[in-house]
Structures are given as C-alpha cells and as structure tokens.
Image (spheres, rainbow, N blue to C red):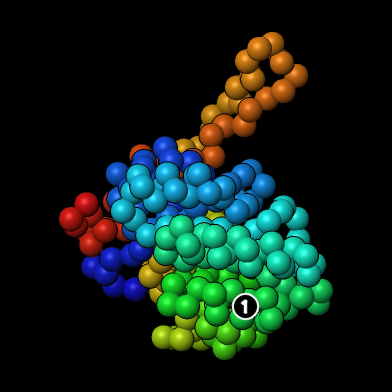
C-alpha cells in the first residue's frame, strides 16, 4: 500500500471516557463493547446513548449476548435480533457480529437476518471468522450475505503472524468486502502490516503496555480489578505517526 495513502484506524472501546479519548487522539471509527475482558459483549443502552452523544465518530456496536463460543441457540438468536434492533434504533452506524454453525462455518441464516435488519448500515463479521475451517470459503459466504467488512488476523494469533493470509484475503476480497486487520497491532508493527498486506483499515484497543491491578475498595483485598481496558490516546497517536503524513493530516 502506498505510504501516502490514509489508513482507517478503528478503536475498540468500552466506556465513554475511552471513546472520547480515542476521538481526540484521531481515531476514525469506534467499535463499542461491554466487558472487553471477556472479548467484548453487547453494550447496554445507556452506554450506547452516552457514547453516541459524546463523539461524532461512527460507532459500530458489538452484538454478542454472552462469552464463549459463537454457536447460538434459537433463544439466543432471538435475543441477538432484539439487541440488533435496539442498537440500530439508538443510531449506531453498524453492528459487529460473529455467528457460526456447529461445524464451524458461518451461520448463514442468522447472519442474513442481521444484514437484512441493518439495511444500508454496516455489518462487520468479527474474529469468529478466524476459526472457520476455510477463510476463503467464509469470506465468499460473507460477500454473498451482504456483510460489509470482516475483522481478521488471517487466522493467526496476531495480525503480524497472519500477514501472508491477510494479504491473500485482501486480494480475494478485491472490492467485494472490506478487510479490517486486527489482533496485536501497535505503533511498532502497523506500518509493516499495512505495507505487506494491502489492508487499508486497522483495529485495536491500542492500550498502553503494562499497568498493575488495583484492589477493590472497602477492604475486599481478595478481589482485584484488572487494568482499564479502554484505549490509550498516546498509543493511538503513536499508531497514527507510524502510518505517516496521510494519517496526520487534518487531525
């Protein structure tokens, strides 16, 4: 990818504070979750409303009713549809979803139901994609179902480890579907990732490294609170600088 081309930076957030920080640091789009320590769950209505009021950035909301696998029962599918309807009514720009069949392939029926609900708004298939039996077949299925974008590491533990597969997915996708690279992206590796894959979008929490746990107050010393999961404005700025001048213009 040419170094003078801008790259979309999507930041994964879980609070009003992290959404505002990401906006001020130059993020282009937000993915809003609850419970990032569980991999991200459907955000509650109050959080959605406050984030939408606090920032003008497009907000893609996670639709995931529970932690664990991505194979959902009929009852869970009904919850997913209701949550999707509520999020769209609240005004989100899109939905992040990931539904698999017991065989591990994309769940066509549930995915199609959500793309139909979303209409012209974005539907993003998250990293459940990375555990499908065939990334190429899954990509083609998502195109057929009208999914706008797929978040992927190329099936690897990190996007850097998945560079060869990501490059192949970008080539296969062409103009049919957007490929959003995610997992372990930071200022030290983002330029290499973009140059070697052709990805024009990157995703991450961009948390500052390190940070010790803090005890819960009121003497409950046996319980610990993990470091805040929200994004770090400084890390986002470092990623922007690493991507070059095109990502620093008008910010």
Rendered position, 170 above or below 95: below
Q: Nearer the viewer, residue 210 or 54?
A: 54
Relative to 245, residue 17 above or below: above
Q: Measured from the top left, where is residue 221 in percent x and y?
A: 71, 15
Q: Tag 1's secondary structure?
A: helix
Residue located at (42% from left, 64% from top): 93
Q: Position of residue 236 (x, y in %)?
A: 37, 47
The answer to whether residue 191 is left or right of residue 66 is left
Q: Quadrant of the N terminus?
A: bottom left
* Location of residue 89 in the rendering, given as x and y in whole percent from the top left corner: 47, 62
Question: Which quarter of the figure has residue 116?
Answer: bottom right
**Of residues 4 and 99, the one drawn nearer to the viewer in this rendering:** 99
In screen coordinates, is 105 left or right of 35? right
Residue 178, can we see it? no
Foreground residue among 234 and 26 = 26
**Front residue of 205 and 38:** 38
- Residue visible at 48% across and 41% down in the picture: 15
| Farthest residue, direction top | 219
Whether residue 48 is visible, yes or no, is yes
Q: Position of residue 164 (x, y in %)?
A: 54, 74
Q: Residue at x 49, y 44 (%)?
A: 47
Q: Residue at x 69, y 81 (%)?
A: 109
- As drawn, 160 above or below 208: below
Which residue bears the numbered disc 1?
113
Would you call the spot at circle 1 few (<14 residues within 10 Å), some (14-19), or many (20 or more)? few
Q: Is residue 24 left or right of residue 215?
A: left
């Amino acid at each position: 990818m040419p170094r003078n081309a801008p790259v979309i930076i999507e930041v994964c957030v879980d609070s009003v504070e992290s959404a505002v920080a990401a906006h001020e640091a130059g993020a282009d789009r937000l993915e809003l979750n609850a419970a990032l320590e569980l991999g991200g769950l459907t955000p509650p209505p109050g959080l959605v409303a406050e984030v939408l009021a606090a920032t003008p950035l497009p907000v893609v909301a996670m639709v995931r009713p529970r932690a664990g696998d991505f194979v959902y029962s009929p009852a869970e599918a009904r919850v997913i549809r209701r949550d999707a309807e509520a999020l769209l009514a609240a005004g989100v720009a899109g939905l992040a979803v990931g539904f698999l069949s017991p065989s591990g392939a994309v769940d066509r029926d549930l995915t199609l139901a959500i793309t139909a609900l979303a209409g012209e708004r974005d539907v993003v298939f998250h990293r459940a994609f990375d555990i499908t039996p065939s990334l190429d077949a899954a990509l083609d299925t998502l195109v057929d179902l009208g999914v706008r974008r797929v978040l992927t590491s190329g099936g690897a533990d990190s996007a850097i480890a998945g560079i060869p597969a990501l490059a192949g997915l970008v080539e296969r996708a062409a103009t049919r579907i957007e490929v959003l690279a995610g997992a372990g992206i930071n200022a030290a590796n983002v330029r290499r990732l973009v140059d070697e894959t052709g990805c024009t979008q990157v995703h991450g929490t961009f948390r500052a490294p390190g940070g010790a746990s803090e005890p819960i107050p009121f003497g409950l010393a046996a319980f610990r609170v993990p470091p805040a999961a929200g994004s770090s404005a400084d890390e986002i700025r470092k990623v922007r600088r690493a991507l070059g001048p095109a990502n620093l213009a008008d910010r």
